[in-house]
Image (spheres, rainbow, N blue to C red):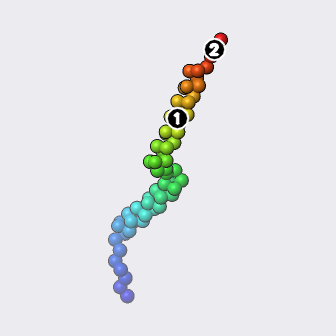
Protein backbone atom coordinates (compact mmCIF):
# COMPACT_ATOMS: atom_id res chain seq x y z
CA UNK A 1 0.00 0.00 0.00
CA UNK A 2 2.84 2.35 -0.70
CA UNK A 3 2.02 5.23 -2.96
CA UNK A 4 4.25 7.35 -5.07
CA UNK A 5 6.15 9.98 -3.11
CA UNK A 6 5.41 13.44 -4.47
CA UNK A 7 7.33 16.59 -3.66
CA UNK A 8 4.50 19.09 -3.12
CA UNK A 9 6.68 22.12 -3.86
CA UNK A 10 7.61 20.69 -7.26
CA UNK A 11 4.02 19.70 -7.94
CA UNK A 12 2.75 23.21 -7.15
CA UNK A 13 5.43 24.80 -9.37
CA UNK A 14 4.64 22.40 -12.21
CA UNK A 15 0.94 23.20 -11.91
CA UNK A 16 1.65 26.95 -11.92
CA UNK A 17 3.88 26.58 -15.01
CA UNK A 18 1.16 24.62 -16.82
CA UNK A 19 -1.47 27.24 -15.98
CA UNK A 20 0.85 30.03 -17.15
CA UNK A 21 1.50 28.19 -20.42
CA UNK A 22 -2.24 27.75 -20.97
CA UNK A 23 -2.89 31.44 -20.28
CA UNK A 24 -0.09 32.44 -22.68
CA UNK A 25 -1.54 30.20 -25.39
CA UNK A 26 -4.98 31.79 -24.94
CA UNK A 27 -3.46 35.29 -25.12
CA UNK A 28 -1.51 34.41 -28.27
CA UNK A 29 -4.68 33.30 -30.02
CA UNK A 30 -6.61 36.36 -28.85
CA UNK A 31 -4.00 39.09 -29.28
CA UNK A 32 -1.12 37.66 -31.21
CA UNK A 33 -0.26 38.53 -34.78
CA UNK A 34 2.70 37.31 -36.70
CA UNK A 35 5.57 39.60 -37.58
CA UNK A 36 4.54 39.42 -41.24
CA UNK A 37 1.00 40.57 -40.41
CA UNK A 38 2.32 43.51 -38.38
CA UNK A 39 4.72 44.46 -41.19
CA UNK A 40 1.96 44.23 -43.78
CA UNK A 41 -0.32 46.47 -41.72
CA UNK A 42 2.48 48.98 -41.11
CA UNK A 43 3.25 49.10 -44.85
CA UNK A 44 -0.41 49.64 -45.66
CA UNK A 45 -0.65 52.41 -43.07
CA UNK A 46 2.45 54.10 -44.52
CA UNK A 47 1.00 53.83 -48.03
CA UNK A 48 -2.23 55.47 -46.89
CA UNK A 49 -0.36 58.26 -45.12
CA UNK A 50 1.70 58.94 -48.26
CA UNK A 51 -1.43 59.02 -50.40
CA UNK A 52 -3.05 61.45 -47.96
CA UNK A 53 0.08 63.65 -47.97
CA UNK A 54 0.10 63.73 -51.79
CA UNK A 55 -3.57 64.67 -51.79
CA UNK A 56 -2.93 67.49 -49.31
CA UNK A 57 -0.01 68.79 -51.40
CA UNK A 58 -2.14 69.01 -54.53
CA UNK A 59 -4.97 70.83 -52.80
CA UNK A 60 -5.57 74.35 -54.13
CA UNK A 61 -6.37 76.88 -51.43
CA UNK A 62 -8.06 80.21 -52.07
Judge by depth and name the residue closer to the eye, 59 or 31. Answer: 59
- Residue 12 placement (x, y as % from top left): 40, 65
Q: Is residue 62 left or right of residue 39?
A: right
x%, y% of residue 21? 44, 60
Residue drawn at (65%, 11%), measured in percent from left and top? Answer: 62
**Residue drawn at point x = 47 percent, y = 61 percent:** 22
What element does badge 1 sit on? helix
Mark 1 vs mark 2, CA separation in Å = 24 Å
Name the residue beneath numbered marker 1.
Answer: 47
Most extreme residue toward the bottom is 1
Camera-nearest residue between 3 and 56: 56
Which residue matches tag 2? 61
28 shown above or below 42: below
Secondary-structure class at tag 2: loop
Q: Position of 15 compared to 47: left or right? A: left
Q: Where is residue 33 shown, x and y percent of the image?
A: 49, 50
11 up-or-down from 1: above or below: above
Residue at 38% in and 65% down: 14
Amino acid sequence: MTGEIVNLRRARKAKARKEAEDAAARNRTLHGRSKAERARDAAERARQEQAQARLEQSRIED
